């Protein structure tokens, strides 16, 4: 129960930071996608079920506030959380490189689906322009922010694991 409350607050904090501080932390029109970092980190550290749940609720928040259709971004984030959750079997507390690679891949998948649903279906076919101007800067910025945010989420997860171990 304590872990679910922590996940709830993590989602809310990342969402508020991402949506309200956009104009203050954006570089070259790109902003780190903190919810992708959150979903990937929790899926990698805790597995498929946690990644799916955190992805669903993170995507649902995005849908409610910014989406045209409720459930589209929830589905995308849920799929990302579920797929990254398979990597939980190779999770190592000392490895910080693999989660950053997963964050980059997940951000690319998220942005690709965003392009498909928001631009491609409306007839805007210049993917190379969209990749250069929007996807690549956001991936770089998200991975850079992921270094700090993943370390923080890793410490929170480790503290929750220790707390659960003490209670048993």
Image (spheres, rainbow, N blue to C red):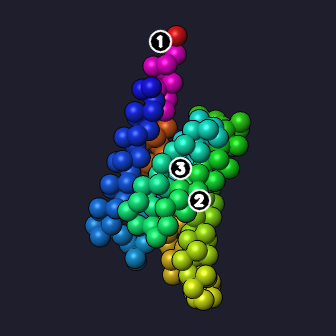
Picture coordinates of residue 89, whole percent (x, y) = 71, 36
Q: Which residue is mark 1?
A: 167
**Predominant SS along the magenta part:** helix
What residue is rendered at 54% in x and 66% in y?
A: 139
Picture coordinates of residue 154, whole percent (x, y) = 49, 38
Query: Which region is colored magenta?
Result: 155-165
Q: Residue furthest front?
A: 70
Badge 2 marks a residue whose secondary structure is helix
Q: Nearer the viewer, mark 3 or mark 1?
A: 3
Q: Nearer the viewer, mark 2 or mark 1?
A: 2
Residue 76 has which mark? Answer: 2
Badge 1 marks a residue whose secondary structure is helix
Task: For label 1, count other residues whose C-alpha is less than 10 Å away and answer few (under 14), some (14-19) or many (20+).
Answer: few
Q: Which residue is mark 3?
A: 56
What residue is rendered at 41% in x and 60% in y?
A: 64
Badge 3 marks a residue whose secondary structure is helix
Residue at mark 2 to residue at mark 3: CA–CA distance: 8 Å
Vertical arrangement, residue 146 with respect to residue 27, above or below:
above
Asked if residue 35 shows in the view, the reply is no
Task: Examine the image and state in which quarter residue 63 appears.
Answer: bottom left
Residues 105 and 35: in front is 35
Residue 162 lies in the magenta stretch: yes
Residues 61 and 160: in front is 61
Residues 90 and 77: in front is 77
Q: Between disc 3 and disc 1, whose residue precedes?
A: 3
Q: Is residue 64 left or right of residue 168?
A: left
Q: What is the quadrant of the N terminus in the image?
A: top left
Picture coordinates of residue 3, whole percent (x, y) = 45, 30
């Amino acid at each position: 129960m304590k872990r679910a409350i922590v996940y709830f607050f993590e989602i809310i904090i990342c969402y508020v930071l991402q949506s309200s501080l956009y104009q203050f932390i954006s570089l070259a029109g790109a902003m780190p996608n903190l919810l992708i970092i959150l979903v990937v980190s929790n899926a990698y550290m805790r597995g498929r079920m946690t990644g799916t749940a955190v992805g669903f609720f993170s995507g649902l928040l995005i849908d409610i506030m910014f989406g045209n259709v409720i459930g589209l971004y929830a589905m995308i984030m849920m799929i990302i959380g579920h797929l990254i959750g398979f990597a939980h079997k190779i999770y190592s507390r000392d490895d910080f490189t693999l989660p950053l690679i997963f964050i980059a891949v997940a951000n690319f998948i998220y942005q690709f689906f965003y392009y498909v649903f928001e631009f491609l279906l409306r007839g805007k076919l210049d993917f190379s322009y969209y990749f250069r101007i929007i996807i690549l800067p956001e991936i770089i910025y998200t991975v850079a922010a992921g270094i700090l945010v993943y370390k923080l989420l890793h410490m929170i997860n480790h503290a929750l694991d220790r707390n659960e171990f003490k209670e048993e």
